Image: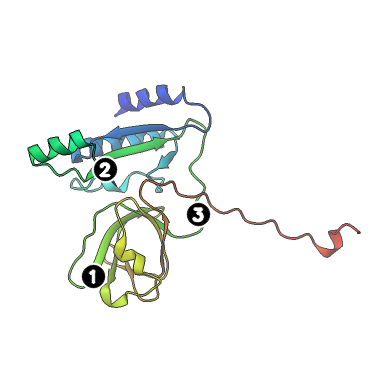
């Protein structure tokens, strides 16, 4: 991992302030896990990850050998690719990859937003009478589940999420390996897959004390 991390450091040294280095790998378990291990080396060296990670510690997807992390984006296939895919019997309705967006040395992680955020890192894990996803956020990687009977106007979006979406959730309860949502929960999409997470809103400055107001 260290030689790969050293190469990324060399490239990042050429990146202008405010710029980013994007690293792409195939969405296979082996290549994805290797990229996540390189990610951990870079984080240990003090580099910040702009995307997709919101968790700042060692990647939780590496805890279990069976886990890995990849992205998926829908796309319109060029005609020639569509013809090749059809002839080969392949299904290419979506592009899959593992990726990192790294910040240059000395630049920090994105300012955390006040909401409880998770990036959806799985496909729908729908079961009988419930919807479930794996989410990864500042707290780590965990399951997010809600029973159909708790569906309301405020949490309806949970049943339509896609891998890569970043969501805010409220009123959850720790259950099993993750969090359970119910009819009190509110779910909002902060950023759809492929979009950047908007920066944290700035806190308005407090008004001056009456005694400090300038005379008019």
Which of label 3 and label 2 is nearer to you?
2
Which numbered disc, 1 or 2, marks the residue that appears first in the sequence? 2
> What is the secondary structure assignment of the residue under circle 2?
loop
**How far apart are labels 3 and 1 at the CA level?**
28 Å
The Cα atoms of the two marked residues, 3 and 2, are separated by 33 Å
Q: Nearer the viewer, residue 77 or 176?
A: 77
Q: Which residue is mark 2?
A: 76
In the picture of the structure, the residue carrying the numbered disc 1 is 130
| Image location (x, y in percent) of residue 33 | 24, 39
Assess disc 2: are there few (<14), some (14-19) or many (≥20) residues with their C-alpha within 10 Å of its C-alpha.
few
Q: Quadrant of the N terminus?
A: top left
In the rendered image, residue 35, in percent from the top left (x then y), is placed at 28, 35
Q: Residues within 10 Å of mark 1 (few under 14, many from 20)?
A: some
For residue 161, which quarter of the picture? Answer: bottom left
Q: Which residue position holds label 3?
A: 113
- Mark 1 in CB contact with mark 2 (< 8 angstroms): no
For marks 3 and 1 on the same chain, the one whose residue lies earlier in the sequence: 3
Residue 187 or 114: which is nearer the viewer? Answer: 187
Q: Which residue is painted at 35% across and 49% down in the image?
A: 193
* 113, above or below 87, in the image: below
Q: Are marks 3 and 1 in contact (CB under 8 Å)?
A: no
First in sequence: mark 3 or mark 2? 2
Q: Is residue 61 left or right of residue 198?
A: left
The answer to whether marks 3 and 2 mark residues whose Cβ atoms lie closer than 8 Å is no
Question: How crowded is the residue under tag 3: few (<14 C-alpha within 10 Å), some, or many (20+)?
Answer: some
């Amino acid at each position: 991992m260290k030689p790969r991390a050293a190469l990324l450091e060399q490239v990042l040294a050429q990146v202008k302030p405010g710029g980013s280095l994007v690293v792409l790998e195939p969405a296979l378990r082996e290549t994805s896990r290797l990229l996540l291990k390189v990610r951990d080396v870079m984080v240990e060296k003090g580099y910040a990850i702009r995307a997709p990670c919101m968790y700042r510690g060692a990647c939780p997807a590496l805890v279990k050998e069976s886990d890995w992390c990849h992205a998926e984006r829908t796309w319109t296939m060029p005609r020639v690719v569509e013809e090749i895919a059809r002839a080969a019997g392949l299904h290419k309705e979506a592009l899959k990859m593992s990726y990192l967006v790294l910040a240059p040395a000395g630049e920090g992680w994105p300012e955390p937003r006040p909401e409880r955020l998770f990036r959806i890192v799985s496909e729908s894990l729908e079961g009988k009478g419930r919807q479930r996803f794996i989410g990864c956020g500042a707290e780590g990687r965990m399951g997010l589940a809600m029973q159909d009977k708790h569906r309301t106007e405020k949490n309806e979006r949970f049943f339509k999420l896609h891998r890569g979406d970043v969501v805010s959730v409220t009123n959850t309860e720790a259950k099993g390996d993750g969090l359970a949502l119910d009819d009190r929960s509110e779910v909002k999409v902060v950023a759809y897959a492929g979009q950047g997470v908007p920066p944290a809103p700035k806190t308005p400055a407090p008004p001056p004390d009456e005694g400090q107001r300038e005379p008019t």
